[in-house]
Image (cartoon, grey):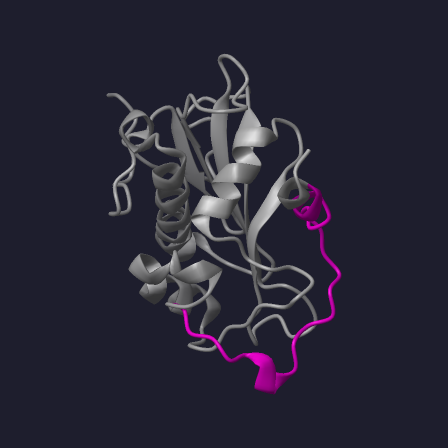
Amino acid sequence: MSALLLSATACTSGGGEQGSDEDEYNMTADEVCQGTLAGSADSLEARARSEEFGEIEQSPSYTPADYADVLMENETVSTDFCVIFAPVVPDSRFANIVFSWSALVPEPGARPEQTYYDISPLASAGDHNARILLTCPVGAAPEDELLQAELTMYDSGSGSDHDDMIAILNSAAYAVVEALGCTEESGLTPEPPARWEAPA
């Protein structure tokens, strides 16, 4: 197991970090998560109700290339791609984005409180979570399993935020699948997906 993977497993999803002091919100929406959210910076600012963000040394964000190495080697441990801090949640993380391999594919439209989006096989957003499941047959990907991208927000949200949630996650997911070399198979584009309409 590489040193990179050992480092990654030490930063797995969790909570309870001490929040940053006000003067540590020294990053813009264009800069957090190694710049991968620049295409959805407006959505991140709208969701956080802030233009100031931060990261901490205990939860460093990965470049897409380094994170692709983690995913290529690791089929079991969910590792944070990045953790974002914002003044709206002063005592802990505001959001985190994580990728993993998953065999579970919920049925689109199964949960009425979720908004579903036009990505196959599934993309959805709720008040606190957004998820994208996509095809990416590379590296450690177990046979017949999908790459799952998930965004979790730790403040209160509402249905009006769902499009912002999926836009943020789509930006990160596009950067990661590009680094993995499966952009075409994933079906993702830099633009956020349209809402999914149930068949009549």
Above or below 174: residue 15 = below
Write the start and end of the magenta stretch as one range: 6-29
Q: Residue 188: percent from the left, percent from the top?
A: 29, 36
Q: In the image as oriented, which residue stretches furthest toward the bottom?
A: 23
Does the magenta segment cover residue 15?
yes
Left-right relation of 10 to 193: right
Q: Residue 198: percent from the left, percent from the top?
A: 30, 26
Quadrant into which the C terminus falls: top left
Does the magenta segment cover residue 161?
no
Q: Residue at x 59, y 81 (%)?
A: 24
Left-right relation of 191 to 72: left
Q: Residue at x 41, y 35 (%)?
A: 180
Q: Main secondary structure of the magenta part?
A: loop
Q: Residue 53: percent from the left, percent from the top?
A: 50, 73
Above or below 81: residue 178 = above
Quadrant into which the N terminus falls: top right
Above or below 70: residue 155 = below
Q: Nearer the viewer, residue 17 or 119?
A: 17
Q: Residue at x 31, y 25 (%)?
A: 185
Left-right relation of 86 to 110: right
Count of labels shown?
Answer: 0
Q: Nearer the viewer, residue 112 or 129?
A: 129
Q: Is residue 115 visible?
A: no
Q: Is residue 177 visible?
A: yes
Q: Residue 34: percent from the left, percent from the top?
A: 45, 60
Q: In the image as oriented, which residue stretches furthest toward the front?
A: 2
